[in-house]
Image (cartoon, helix red, strand yellow):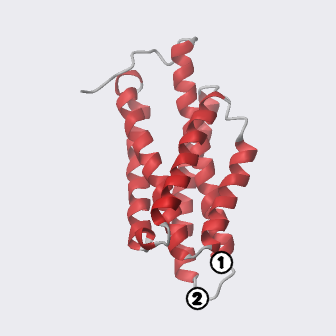
């Protein structure tokens, strides 16, 4: 059963607040994703024989940067403040990317697969909620979800599922992502 939340995103109050939370989280998530790829590329860019991998990561980072630019624009247009935790997301995202890259290519790809799985599920729920309230935003979120699914497939094609300790790494990363979502909504 499809569950819709009826709210007018332009009306002040708690209902409009929910839309602001959604935009704030989406912006924060795309910001974090860009930083993860930057951290991974910082490591792999310094290693011989990783040019093709670095190019793949750059392409995925560019997709996330386009999403981030869209949410930057939407925050400004709708007068929604970004999360106050952006500096933390920069450090945490870059650090997560660098650490998983230092663990190896498969671990870096496991990181990507884990993050993208959480984000695509998050976007699917959001799009369903937004269908009645803001169809244009729902369409944008659905398009971005497809990009995230593609990034997950690329990561899996590059050995994400074969990373040592994959399930533990996935659980840890996804728990962090879900916590970040809850924090970014409010802070």
- 140 or 21, which is in the foreground? 21
Q: Which mark is residue 49?
A: 2
Is residue 187 left or right of 185 when viewed as pictured? right
- Circle 2 packing at 10 Å, graded few (<14), some (14-19), many (20+), is few
Q: Position of residue 80 (x, y in %)?
A: 64, 27
Q: Is residue 25 shown above or below 154?
A: above
In the image, what residue occupies the spot 51% across and 15% down? 15
Q: In the picture, which quadrant includes the C terminus?
A: top right
Q: Can residue 134 be seen?
A: yes
In the image, what residue occupies the spot 60% across and 67% down? 100
Is residue 66 left or right of 102 when viewed as pictured? left
Report helix, strand or loop for mark 2.
Answer: loop
Q: Position of residue 173 (x, y in %)?
A: 55, 54
Q: Position of residue 22 (x, y in %)?
A: 53, 31
Quadrant in which residue 54 is drawn: bottom right
Q: Which residue is mark 1?
A: 45
- 136 or 61, which is in the foreground? 61
Q: Position of residue 96 (x, y in %)?
A: 64, 60
Q: In the picture, which quadrant includes the N terminus?
A: top left
Are the residues tagged 1 and 2 within 8 Å (C-beta)?
no
In the image, what residue occupies the spot 42% across and 60% down? 152
Q: Which mark is residue 167?
A: none
- 150 or 159, which is in the foreground? 159
């Amino acid at each position: 059963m499809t569950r819709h939340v009826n709210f007018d995103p332009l009306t002040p109050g708690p209902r409009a607040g929910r839309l602001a939370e959604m935009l704030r989280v989406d912006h924060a998530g795309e910001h974090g994703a860009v930083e993860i790829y930057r951290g991974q590329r910082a490591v792999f860019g310094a290693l011989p024989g990783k040019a093709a991998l670095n190019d793949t990561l750059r392409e995925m980072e560019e997709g996330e940067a386009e999403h981030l630019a869209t949410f930057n624009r939407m925050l400004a247009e709708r007068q929604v403040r970004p999360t106050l935790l952006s500096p933390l997301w920069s450090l945490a995202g870059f650090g997560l990317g660098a650490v998983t890259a230092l663990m190896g290519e498969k671990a870096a790809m496991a990181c990507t697969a884990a993050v993208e799985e959480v984000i695509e599920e998050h976007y699917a729920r959001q799009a369903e909620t937004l269908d009645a309230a803001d169809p244009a935003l729902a369409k944008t979120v659905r398009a971005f979800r497809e990009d995230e699914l593609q990034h997950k497939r690329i990561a899996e094609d590059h050995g994400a599922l074969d990373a040592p300790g994959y399930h533990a790494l996935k659980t840890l990363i996804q728990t962090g992502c879900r916590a970040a979502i809850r924090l970014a909504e409010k802070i």
